[in-house]
Every structure is written in C-alpha cells, then in structure tokens.
Image (cartoon, rainbow, N blue to C red):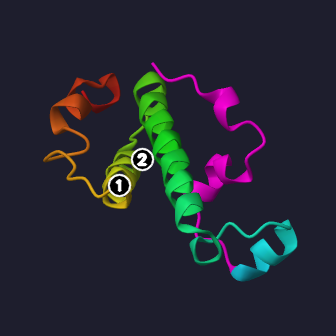
Amino acid sequence: MLDAERAFFGDPSAEWIFGFLDLPAAFWASYGQRLADADLTEVAVWRRRAYQARGALQMMLEGCRFGFDAAFAQRQFALRCRELADGLGIEPGPRAFHPKAAAACPANA
C-alpha cells in the first residue's frame, strides 16, 4: 500500500518521532539541524507535514495489525491532511479519515 522508505532516506525531517513530539529549542540546538516549523521554509514545512501524515498512517495500520487503539494517529493523520491541503490551496474531502474505516479494524471490534 505504501512503501516509500527509500524516497526519504537520509532526510532528517522524515524521522517519525519528530512528527509526534513537541521538542524544545534546546533539542534542536544540540541536534545540529533545526527542524522546528519556525526554522523551516514553507516548502520544508509542507514536506515535513507529508512525512508526519505518512507516519500517522503507518501507526494506524500498526494499530489494526497489533490491536492497539490508534485514535491518536487517526487525529494526527486528519490534521496533517488538512494542513497539506491548506498548503496546496485545495479543499480536503469532508473527512480525512472515515469512521467506518476505524470500525472495520479488528482492534476496534
């Protein structure tokens, strides 16, 4: 379904953990590359949002696979899809993640 591993190989913005944590400025100062939204260009922020959406989608799939509640990932995915759509100037669909899809997941049965 989604196998883009090599498409972002070596891009620090693709680190999945950065998509779920609000890291302080001190972290970025020590990390060596500032990836906080305020330090990125508009294009880099859009790319980071795409990586975050991908990470959230992977967590949703893992929730179904391993039977844990991935509601946090569903919220992140919907948020990032809205942000991506805003960045492109398009209107997203009525819902980025349909509740019937969540109901179909064995973890939510």
Point 30% across, 25% down: residue: 105
Does the magenta portion include 32? no
Along the line of sight, the residue nearer the viewer: 73 or 89: 89
Q: How many marks?
A: 2
Whether residue 16 appears in magenta in the rendering, the answer is: yes
The circle on residue 88 is 1
The numbered disc on residue 96 is none
Rendered residue at 44%/37% (across/down): 57
Q: Position of residue 41 (x, y in %)?
A: 59, 68
Instruction: Spot the residue most to the left.
Output: 94
Seen in the image, is 15 located left or right of residue 30? left
- For the record, the magenta segment spans 1-24
Looking at the picture, how far across and down is residue 27, in whole percent? 77, 73
Secondary structure beneath label 2: helix
Q: Position of residue 39 (x, y in %)?
A: 65, 75
- State left or right for residue 8 relative to residue 49: right
Q: Amino acid at mark 2?
A: Ala
Q: CA distance from mark 2 to mark 1?
A: 22 Å
For the N terminus, the image quarter is top left
Sequence-wise, the earlier of marks 2 and 1 is 2
Residue under numbered circle 2: 73
- For label 1, the SS is helix
